[in-house]
Structure formats: structure tokens, C-alpha cells
Image (cartoon, helix red, strand yellow):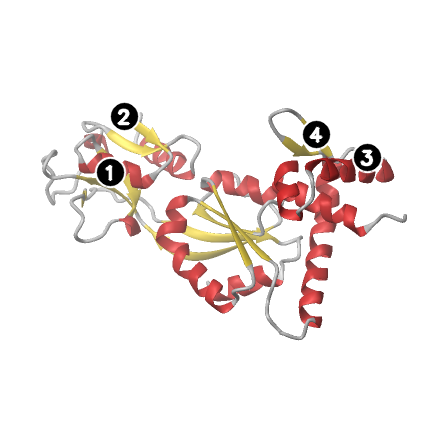
Amino acid sequence: MDINLELYKVFYYVATSLSFSEASRQLFISQSAVSQSIKTLEKKLNHTLFIRSTKKVLLTPEGELLLQHVKPALQMLVEGESLLSGDNMLKGQLRIGASDTICRYYLISYLQQFHQAFPDVRIKVTNSTSIGCVELLEKGQVDLIVCNFPNSRLGNHIQIRVLKEFQDIFVGNPEYFPLNDVPREMNTLLEYPILMLSGKSTTSEYLHQAFASQGLNLLPEVELNSNDLLMDLARIGLGIAFIPDYMLSPDDSLKPIPLACGLSPRQLVIVHHDNQPLSQAAERFLEIL
């Protein structure tokens, strides 16, 4: 079948961004040209590749299947061009999905190292919860994700590597709550307003399960999408916050609340599909981590 490679290139940018306007911006062509290219490709393949609506663009099953083949093919072409250029400099794009907490408190230093080593690689970080990051990976919108584990959304055909083990803790401001070093039972924590991440997060799933395992019903006072904001609210005395221990510095006004029965630790993991070839940029980043 004689299909212009440029059509596959346009398809790749629309499929990975799920946006005709974003693909237009990245390709430096008009949005109408992007739309016409997709229509031409769909006609030649005799398959609808995208579900279009006024609010969003989604891949059809046929589009998802095509992306699995187009993505590694285009990446190999880019890498081949880089090798032939003679400068031996890694180029291309590194696409990572991670939460704002993981980005700020863990990934930043590694992204800095990678950027210094490979300045010609474009780094795209997509922010989402650990659950949302799995969806980004499944849709092919990112090459790698760094997320919390356990993660109920992680399925088959993936490679997982543990990067760091951490402990979740409750913290509060002693100026507002009579905190001390005496370990507390979980049920006594319900006496305080609990500040935690929203229900669409692995942290929320984990904490609700921890309370349920002791026959307790957790009813948080505040649910937000930002751990940093939870800490800000805890500092002004609105409640006790549930956060990963690596966020708390020794000089913070917030202090950890010891538990009589400690919570089981969790891990930060890096995840990618085992049935999709990684770009050279993604492979080099895995080596740095």
C-alpha cells in the first residue's frame, strides 16, 4: 500500500497528543492540514482512526493498534537520522508521566542530570495522579511513568522497577493539636480533621484500605489533588495531613504523628510497556535513574 510517510507522522502527533491543534503546533502546519492528512490516511486504510467530538479526541481500537507500530517506526527513523548526522548527540523526545509530588521531590534532580547530558532531547513531563499516569501509558501518550506502587490500574505486559521505598505518615502542627511522641491507635486519628489526596489516587485507595482493615470508616475533612497544599492547610491548623515521608523536612513546623501499628511501606516505581520498544532517550533516562 503506497502511503506517504508524512501521513503517518501527522497521525503520530495527533495520536500522542490527542489534539489536532497541539499536533498542528508541533508540526508547524495548519490545523486544517492536520485534519485533511488524517482524513486521507483513514480513507487509504479504510478505517476510522479517531473518535472526534467537540470536547476531546480519542483513538479508536484500530487507531491504537496502528500507533503501536507507527510509534517505534518513527522513533527508529529519528534515531537513525541522529546517528547519520555525525555529531553522536542523542536527539528526539523523552515523554514521562508523573504526579506533581513525584516530579518535585524525586524526579527533578534526575531530569536535570539527563538534560545536562543530552541537551538536544526534548523533555515532556505530563502531570497526573499515579492512576492517571497508567492511563497515559496505556494510550501511548508517554514512554515511561513514575508512580506509586501498589497501583490498582497496572495490568499485564508492563515492566516495573522499584526506585525508592517510602513510608506514608500523618503530620500536624503542634501549635494547634496536642501532639506528642506517644504512638497512637488508628481510631484516635479520626478525632482530628484528616486532610488527604482525592479519591482518584493510589494514596486515597491505600489509606481507605488501611482504615477499613481495622473496621474503621475514614471520612476525610478535605480531599485535594496537591500534597503541598495539604501541608499548607495542616500548617495553619485545619487538620492533620497524610503525606509521603520524603516530603517532610526536619525544620518544618509540621511534625509526624507516630502510630502504634505502623502502615506498610510503599514504593516509587518506573513503568513501561514490555511489548513496545523504548526510544534511545527513554533507555538513557532509565540508565540515569
C-alpha gap between disc 4 and disc 2:
39 Å
C-alpha gap between disc 3 and disc 1:
51 Å
Q: Determine whether, in the image, residue 240 is placed left or right of residue 82.
A: left
Which residue: 40% across, 34% down? 205
The residue that label 4 is drawn on is: 51
The residue that label 1 is drawn on is: 232
The quadrant where residue 260 appears: top left
Answer whether residue 99 is visible to the viewer in this image.
yes
Mark 2 residue crowding within 10 angstroms, few (<14) / some (14–19) / many (20+): few
Q: Secondary structure at mark 1?
A: helix
Q: Nearer the viewer, residue 196 or 58?
A: 58
Three-letter amino acid code at the position of disc 3: His
The picture places residue 111, in percent across and down from the top left corner, at 45, 59
Q: Is residue 53 above or below residue 231?
A: above
Three-letter amino acid code at the position of disc 1: Asp
C-alpha gap between disc 3 and disc 2:
49 Å
Mark 3 residue crowding within 10 angstroms, few (<14) / some (14–19) / many (20+): few
Q: Nearer the viewer, residue 162 or 124?
A: 124
